[in-house]
Image: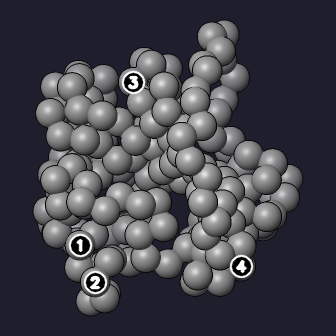
Amino acid sequence: MGHVIVTGFVSLDGIVTDPDGSGGTPAGGWAFRHGPETHGGDKFRLGELMDTGVLLLGKNTWQLFSKLWPNRTDEFSTRMNKMAKVVASHTLTDVSAFPNSTLMRGSLADYVRTEPRTIAVTGSVSVIRALQAADLVDEYRLMTLPSVVGSGERMFGPSDHPVHLRLESVVPAGAASLATYVR
């Protein structure tokens, strides 16, 4: 099984819903109000993982990304377009709109347990929650932004089992901070 890294924009109050405003929620766009120095480029420090790993996306995040990335030609976008992507969806049938995308076969847990490459998960709260429930997340890279959103989905839902992580690093990123937590 590969290493599973969850990345995400998180508000000060733990909200992950609609950071870019594409979801049309009342508070949407909260992460992108802080300027491109906060969210542009490889802010989650994926580095060579973009060449050797796989990006795991849920249907909604994949659909958003498939409209956003393929038309961009900067260095980061080119790497994002070349990166292997697996889409966890039971309803999508055509994933040709976003280069190097394939549909996941079987269950999410089975896929993750048999994927030898490092898996990065971004957005896709339903995928993150399923991985958390199956205890399959090895690392979180959370970009915390100085916004209090008030309502929406949280990175961590209710749980009967506490999970204790170790802080590996914290680095400033524009108005935000990127904190990496590992098992």
Residue 164 drawn above or below residue 76:
above
Q: Earlier in the sequence, mark 1 or mark 4?
A: 4
> Mark 1 against mark 4, which lies toward the viewer?
1
At x 17%, y 61%, the residue is 51
Residue at mark 1? 79
Disc 1 element: helix
The answer to whether the residue labelled 1 contacts the one labelled 2, judged by CB atoms less than 8 Å apart, is yes
**Which residue matches tag 2?**
75
The image position of residue 19, as x and y in percent, is: 63, 64
Which three-letter amino acid code belongs to the residue tagged 2?
Glu
In the image shown, does 86 or 179 lie closer to the viewer?
179
**Residue 142 image position (x, y, % from top left):** 58, 50
Name the residue at the top extreme.
160
Count residues near mark 3 (Cα–Cα under 10 Å), then give few for <14, some for 14-19, many for 20+.
some
**Tag shown at residue 33:** 4
- Give whichever of discs 2 and 4 has the lower sequence position: 4
How much space separates mark 4 and mark 3, taking CA atoms?
32 Å
Q: Are marks 1 and 4 in contact (CB under 8 Å)?
A: no
Give me the residue at 65% from left, 75% from top: 174
Residue bearing the label numbered 3: 136
